[in-house]
Amino acid sequence: MDLLKELTETNGAPGFEHPIRSIMKREIDKTGAPLVYDHMGSIFGQKRGSSTGPKIMLAGHMDEVAFMISEVTKDGYLRFVPLGGWWDQVILSQRVHILTEKKTFTGVVGSKPPHILTAEERKKVVPMREMFIDIGANSADQVKEWGIRVGDPIMPICPFEIMPDNDTILAKALDNRAGCYLALEVLKQLKDSEHPNSIYCGATVQEEVGLRGAATAPYAVEPDLAIAMDVGIAQDGPGDNSNKAKLGAGPLITFLDSSMVPHVPLRNLVMDIAEKNNIPYQVDVMLGGGTDAGRFHLFKKGVPSIVIGVASRYIHSHVSMVSKSDLENTVKLLVAFVKEMDENKMKSLIDF
């Protein structure tokens, strides 16, 4: 888990993914795979197969939800705007890191103590536009002296931890460093394996702000088939959620989201391969949110695409959880899929 720990504890806001890209490059280089880039910063390692099977793109995304400084007040407080989707209620009183070119500063999102809240204020969700970050500065001039500027990214803080069950992982940015981890693990496992396809394992940029790297990465890869590796929403908290995604129940295959209806023959093939290899899996149907596959499948004439990933609790906040066994089973499923795909199966997918 050292690699996943490094991936989650390293910061990578949308548009500021270079520290994550450096880790991806280092790990891809270890496999000997040639590197493939687009001009936005997406990165992939290429592993050629033994015959003329399809080009398969397996992509996580490097960015995480974050914030950006939008204003420095005269008293030295920082106003901020979101990079990605946040629910305002999870932000107050959280510690954050402000990343400048030379130094990282710690701040806290200011909030009133309950002692001075009116009855009406207690019922109100404070909108982000009214929030501020306190970095211990006394004036705008002091903030400037410290090298903090409008446009600097602001990151959540949450150390990586494996919980006492030795399966549940707690960390920030599992959306979507989990997908980056899956890409690297699949590439490593296929390093010395025979398969008929050309695979491109890696990650895109700026997914959280509009699937932007997903619009450019296919031009670098020219895929015949695409798999977005991302997290889905676990709904296994208190209550009757027997038919909802849960931690530890296997890879999550998305049947529907707001960005895509997956390619149905591809979806069915993935389930067949999972069942043949005794890999448990779950199904996700949700209209809120989308993934990079929403852009991948629209490339040129269309690219059969699907989302395969893991269920996660509390995403788009400072902290999230996934299951280690789910990650392991997702790697097994992706490796089995790559080994089973070939030219004839690809033809059957597009001639339906």
Image (cartoon, rainbow, N blue to C red):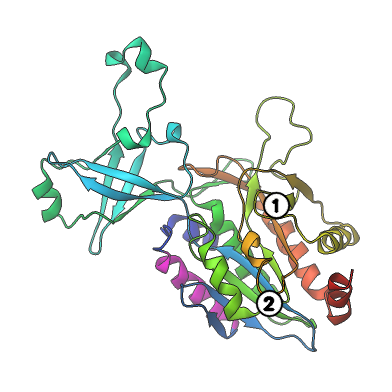
Magenta-highlighted residues: 17-31
Quarter-of-image position of residue 236: top right
Rendered residue at 71%/58% (across/down): 308
In the rendered image, the vertical position of residue 28 relative to residue 307, given as above or below: below
17 or 275: which is nearer to us? Answer: 17
Q: Earlier in the sequence, mark 1 or mark 2?
A: 2
Quick one: which residue is furthest to the bottom in this view?
Answer: 51
Cα gap from disc 1 to disc 2, whole angstroms:
29 Å
Q: Position of residue 116 (x, y in %)?
A: 27, 15
Left/right of residue 134 with respect to residue 311 in the rendered view: left
Q: Helix, strand or loop at disc 2?
A: loop
Q: Which residue is mark 1?
A: 325
Q: Residues within 10 Å of mark 1 (few under 14, many from 20)?
A: some
Rendered residue at 77%/62% (across/down): 333
The rendered magenta stretch, by its main secondary structure, is classed as helix
Residue type, label 1: Ser
Mark number displayed over residue 278:
none
Q: Position of residue 107 (x, y in %)?
A: 27, 43
Q: Position of residue 157 (x, y in %)?
A: 39, 46
Whether residue 51 is in magenta: the answer is no
Q: Are marks 1 and 2 in contact (CB under 8 Å)?
A: no
In the rendered image, the vertical position of residue 91 relative to residue 238, given as above or below: below
Q: Which residue is mark 2?
A: 223
Residue type, label 2: Pro
Quadrant that contains the N terminus? bottom right
Quick one: which residue is furthest to the top in this view?
Answer: 119
